[in-house]
């Protein structure tokens, strides 16, 4: 458990949290592994956790009937995947697929929501971290959409 606590404390996402918060979060964490081609989750499924990626790559995808799956972003070591565990109705809004062997920490959303209710400082710190990620991802998606649907400027 000590090495898990240390690794989580050193992750870019959690490194600024207080040691007592790292201790609380560690109690909700487990190691997970996904093979290349394996889906971590699908849109509409219950979002029960989020992931801190240690190794590997994960595509965040949306499915369209006419084009099939479209990758909107690729995550790799150090990235965090998933905030749907934090926002009711706690359902995934995208698909996530490993494109190579992925090793990650899975953090149980129910466990964390309970700990955040008991320790509002922890909840606030996590919310600030996730809000930053949401902002970065929305900006990356906006840039991606501009690239995909680039049209000449009106004159």
Image (cartoon, helix red, strand yellow):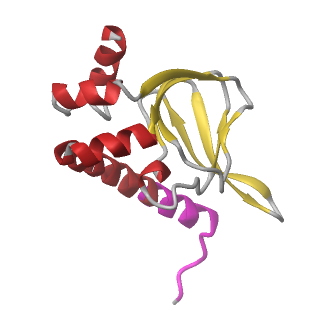
* Residue drawn 31% across the image and 17% down it: 5
Q: Is residue 54 above or below residue 59?
A: above
Q: Along the horizontal axis of the image, is 88 left or right of 40?
A: left
Front-lying residue, 106 or 68: 106
Front-lying residue, 31 or 138: 31
Q: Please tell me whether residue 43 belongs to the stretch shown in magenta.
A: no
Q: Along the horizontal axis of the image, is 137 left or right of 122?
A: right
Q: In this view, does 107 lie above or below 133?
A: above
Q: Which residue lies furthest to the bottom in this view?
A: 155
Q: Along the horizontal axis of the image, is 67 left or right of 117?
A: right
Q: Please tell me whether residue 147 belongs to the stretch shown in magenta.
A: yes
Front-lying residue, 83 or 53: 83
Q: In this view, does 88 lie above or below 29?
A: below
* Residue drawn 65% across the image and 56% down it: 44
Q: Along the horizontal axis of the image, is 147 left or right of 1?
A: right
User: Looking at the picture, how far across and down is residue 70, in whole percent?
Assistant: 70, 53
* Residue drawn 44% across the image and 38% down it: 80
User: Looking at the picture, how far across and down is residue 114, in whole percent?
Assistant: 34, 43
Front-lying residue, 32 or 116: 116
The quadrant of the image that shows the N terminus is top left
Q: What's drawn in magenta, residue-wise? A: 139-154
Determine which quarter of the picture holds residue 6. top left
């Amino acid at each position: 458990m000590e090495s898990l606590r240390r690794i989580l404390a050193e992750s870019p996402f959690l490194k600024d949290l207080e040691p007592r918060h790292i201790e609380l979060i560690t109690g909700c964490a487990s190691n997970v592994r996904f093979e290349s081609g394996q889906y971590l989750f699908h849109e509409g499924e219950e979002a029960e956790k989020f992931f801190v990626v240690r190794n590997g790559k994960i595509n965040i995808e949306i499915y369209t009937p006419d084009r099939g799956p479209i990758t909107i972003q690729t995550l790799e070591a150090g990235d965090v995947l998933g905030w749907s565990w934090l926002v009711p109705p706690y359902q995934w809004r995208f698909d996530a697929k490993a494109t190579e062997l992925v090793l990650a920490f899975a953090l149980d959303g129910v466990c964390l929501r309970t700990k955040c209710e008991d320790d509002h400082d922890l909840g606030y710190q996590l919310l600030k971290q996730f809000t930053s990620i949401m902002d970065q991802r929305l900006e990356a998606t906006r840039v991606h959409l501009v690239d995909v649907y680039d049209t000449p400027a009106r004159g």
